[in-house]
Amino acid sequence: MSEGVEWALHCCLNLAWAGSAGAIPTTKLAKYYDLPASYLNKQLQALAKEGLVSSTSGPRGGFRLARPAADISLLDVVTAIEGRTEAFQCRDLLDRAPGSPGTGGWQHHCVIAQAMSSAEMEWRHQLAAQSIADIAARAADRTPGLPERVRDWFEQA
Amino acid sequence: MSEGVEWALHCCLNLAWAGSAGAIPTTKLAKYYDLPASYLNKQLQALAKEGLVSSTSGPRGGFRLARPAADISLLDVVTAIEGRTEAFQCRDLLDRAPGSPGTGGWQHHCVIAQAMSSAEMEWRHQLAAQSIADIAARAADRTPGLPERVRDWFEQA
DNA sequence: GGAATATTACTCGGATACTTTCTGTCCGAGTCTACCAGG
DNA sequence: CCTGGTAGACTCGGACAGAAAGTATCCGAGTAATATTCC
């Protein structure tokens, strides 16, 4: 899985805490974790294209969550970065097997594809069940005062 | 996910049906699906390295399942091809955050890493619960006579 | 003093190189089979 | 006819290129704030 997923998730968390006031530019988000700003920007663009964050240009511009953190799931972020195609792709191998009708569409008929797909659906289900707000709450519970500290850092720096 | 996983899974299925008699060379397996033999061989090597299949050199040589098909799970095949590293890797991003203790080991403490890991564990669990024998039985149930046809093809060709 | 305007600095967004991984190909080492010669 | 040896062909195994995706960087378009000028 792409490293950008990790960056995007952490940034969403920070946006949830710090972005309630205004927009946060890529520069600040990158500086917070000491990441290459331009490349992080690319990931944020992907989030914007999927409607997870909204962007503003010019001074005082930047990114902010486009929806409440409770309405953004981990799956939303993952698919925004990685794309919608499933990890295991049935390439219709059985079409080339001897004695096959060769009519394609095996991703719904091939037993292997079904098994792999059902496992992946379970994974997606797990990710869809957890929102950015859930994660934020858990982190705040573990480290009291963290949301305030993060917000202060982004407002001041 | 690598395309080799699909090839490996289909080959394991064929080995379960056709390999009860003797070893099957890469050439035959490749010809069955019209795949590049040398590259398929590479995937089978990975399976051999993980002890899923055993290889024999020379004439009448080839690959056969090293264990009963019921003792080989889909997860075994996937990890043999893709490696043991988890898809989502925590790069200890929080170490670089301001005010972090910087002691590493976040893959067990970072809330995001935990959430991603638990989802992936669920995926692995799903794959581990299904064996090659299960898949074979389901395929045979759907297409009666399939195991015999496959075995015949491999014995004759 | 207030308002309109030109300037300036800042931000996103996409186009452009570089690196790593995946895909595909090739050739050599080892081994089993089959044939052949000798007893 | 049986046994031992030898040649041959077949298979795996790893080393070697090419393609695709991921990673990183740079520069231009647009925008909002700011300073300036005029009324």
Image: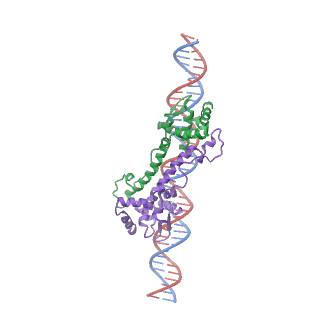
Chain colours: A purple, B green, C red, D blue
Considering only vertical position in the picture, is A56 above or below B112? below
Q: On the picture, is A27 further left or further right than D19?
A: left
| Residue A36 x, y percent position in the rendering | 45, 59
Q: Say which quarter of the image contains residue A139.
A: bottom left
| Residue A48 x, y percent position in the rendering | 51, 63
Q: Could you tell me if residue A139 is visible in this image?
A: yes
Residue closest to the eye, B52 or C29: B52
Residue closest to the eye, B154 or A59: B154
Considering only vertical position in the picture, is A99 above or below D36? above
Number of numbered discs: 0
The C terminus of chain B lies in quadrant: top right
| Residue B124 x, y percent position in the rendering | 47, 46
Considering only vertical position in the picture, is A19 above or below B4? below
Residue closest to the eye, B85 or A138: A138
Q: Say which quarter of the image contains residue B23.
A: top right
Q: On the picture, is B144 further left or further right than A1?
A: right
Q: Could you tell me if residue A2 is visible in this image?
A: no
Q: Residue at x 44, y 70 (%)?
A: A22
| Residue D19 x, y percent position in the rendering | 58, 48
Residue closest to the eye, C36 or B124: B124
